[in-house]
Image (cartoon, rainbow, N blue to C red):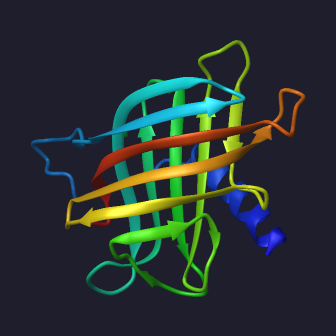
Amino acid sequence: MTHKIKIFSLIVALMGVVSCSDNSTAPDNPVPVEGEGTINVTGALEAQHEGASWFIGLKSGGGNSYLNLTFNISDVGFASEEENTYSLTITMLGNGGAFELTTGEYTLGESEEVLTAVNYVNKEGAERASYGTSPDVTGTVTIQSISDTSIEASYNVRLQEVISTGFLDDFVNITGDLTAKCIANC
């Protein structure tokens, strides 16, 4: 399981730099409309953020069945060409296939149906700080409501530093909520 979590954390970190295109945006409205999210950080780093929030999913079949689902909060929107100064990414992957997204609590790490990971990056200070899921972290992501175009969630997680400033034992506690709007594969 530790090996899966390390690989998954690397995938989540790399997903932050991958872009995606979608044909679902209406031609007369080329800029997607994002929702809003908050990030409260305590521990090795102290910060508070409010930003744009969106989700992208790879659906499998109908309804709320996903192979993967990624939520984002950032100070720049999905379609912006500006570089962000912070971001929070929550990724949920089906463990061996698709999973049905339902309201309720999802624990960080691997479960029978869903692998859930969180990655937080802050570039506002003198040095870049990145924190993510590891075997030593805990927390939950709670899905509060689901519609075809929007998902509301809250989170309370403890993350470990993954890009070191010299102290790999640094941890942060992150709480917040989001109303993410669908950008692709709604």
Q: Quadrant of the C terminus?
A: bottom left
Residue at 27 percent across and 85 percent down: it is 62
Residue 23 % position (x, y): 26, 58
18 or 156: which is nearer to us?
156
Q: Quadrant of the N terminus?
A: bottom right
**From this viewpoint, is residue 132 visible?**
yes
* Residue lying at the far top of the rendered structure: 126
* Residue lying at the far right of the rendered structure: 166
Residue 129 is drawn in which quadrant? top right
Residue 124 is drawn in which quadrant? top right
Residue 85 % position (x, y): 53, 24
Residue 43 % position (x, y): 67, 31
Residue at 61 percent across and 79 percent down: it is 111
Q: Judge whether 92 appears above or below 35 on screen.
A: below
Left or right: where 158 falls relative to 19: right
Residue 36 is drawn in which quadrant? top left
* Residue lying at the far left of the rendered structure: 28
Left or right: where 93 falls relative to 158: left
Q: Judge whether 93 appears above or below 26 on screen.
A: below
176 or 94: which is nearer to us?
176
145 or 123: which is nearer to us?
145
Residue 71 % position (x, y): 43, 53
**From this viewpoint, is residue 77 visible?**
no
103 or 71: which is nearer to us?
103
Residue at 35 percent across and 39 percent down: it is 37
